[in-house]
Amino acid sequence: MLRWGIVGFGDIAAKAVAPAIRAHAGSELAAICRRNPVALERQRQAFDVPQAFTDYDEMLRRAPLDAVYVATPVHLHAAQTLAALDRGLHVLVEKPMAATAAEAKAMVERAEQRGVRLGVAYYHQFIPINAFVRDLVASGELGELTALHGNASSSYNPPLDDPKSWRLIRAAGGGGPLMDLGSHRLQTFCSLAGPARQVAAFSDRRRTAGDVEDVLSLIVDYDSGVQATLSSIWGIDPARGDYEIWCANGYVNVPYARGDECFVTQNGRRRRETHPAPELHDLPLIEDFAAGVKSPERQVLTGDVGLEVQRVIDAAYRSAANGVVVRL
């Protein structure tokens, strides 16, 4: 049985992570941690968790744990992950993995040194429609993969006094919609095209408060020769979460990366494919991580996956800041 602790028990943990851990036959939720003691006790009772802490270090010292899920703001990911790894605990960390690629690299190296598993919560990997698209492209039925395009946007635009406004502050979130939303799409692109070799980007802040971008457009050139474009935007309505795939002999449109359908155009004909999404979209994520704890070679979303995405994000911010193409 994999005994879990969750640090940063906010909306994501309550709505997605904790239910998935409880639904996984080989896992149990042993402890939770958040700073607000009133909310902490309410959630401890709601999820029937044996132990609850307002101090993360105390949870690591006192709770009987095998793994930690890090669901705090991005600037805390590296330190909290390293602390758990140093205690010999496996760690699954929310996306994006860290504030910088240097932090992500340190996390990967520490997990290797301690002989424990590290994963990153890019759960879109396991949404059935995305799995179908990967298999279709890999089969060669549509010919060679040529180009990708994605949108990652939302209406997110809170005032600075909103409790959820930490994403607007670079010191807390590491960046704007590229970190928050675009990172998911970059992971999907990486799963299709492989490692990136150069990145060019433009960014601006048009609508939101804070000191991070609210619009960023980038181009990624991959070692495989595939090119990708991505637009990440906050403060717009309706939101967009779609992506497109061009191959030598066909085209795929996925209207929503967390949805259940896509449209395949081939030989002048367009067909609709449907693959229902699971009710608990984080359950396959927990299953993947637990499988990796037992047999490391079985884990798909390793720390290396998160590091590759972070390398592209870092390059995009350097490109936008300096007006240059950044080679990786």
Image (spheres, rainbow, N blue to C red):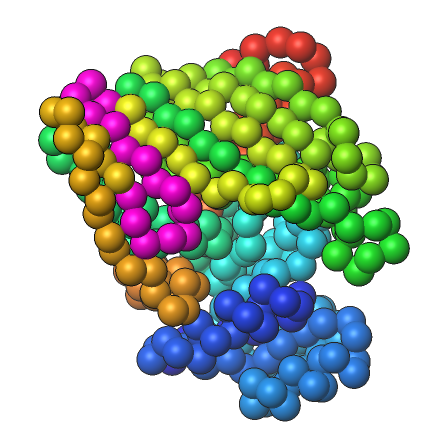
Q: Nearer the viewer, residue 242 or 63?
A: 242
Magenta segment: 247-262
Q: Residue at x 38, y 69 (%)?
A: 279
Residue 45: percent from left, percent from top: 63, 90
Apparent side of residue 129 relative to residue 27 in the rendered image (left or right): left
Considering every residue shown, the one lying at the far top of the view is 324
Residue 213: percent from left, percent from top: 72, 31
Q: Residue at x 35, y 40 (%)?
A: 254
Q: Residue at x 56, y 90 (%)?
A: 48
Q: Nearer the viewer, residue 149 or 288?
A: 149
Apparent side of residue 158 relative to residue 72 in the rendered image (left or right): right
Does residue 300 show up magenta in the picture?
A: no
Could one spot residue 45 in this view of the protein? yes
Q: Residue at x 78, y 71 (%)?
A: 35
How many circles with numbers are drawn on the protein? 0
Residue 229: percent from left, percent from top: 46, 23
Considering every residue shown, the one lying at the far right of the view is 161
Q: Nearer the viewer, residue 256 or 117?
A: 256
Q: Is residue 169 above or below residue 42?
A: above
Q: Quadrant of the N terminus?
A: bottom left
Could one spot residue 104 in this view of the protein? no
Residue 235: percent from left, percent from top: 69, 41
Task: Locate residue 83: give its quadrant.
Answer: bottom right
Task: Locate residue 51: give its quadrant.
Answer: bottom right
Apparent side of residue 322 relative to residue 144 in the rendered image (left or right): right
Q: Is residue 312 above or below residue 225?
A: below
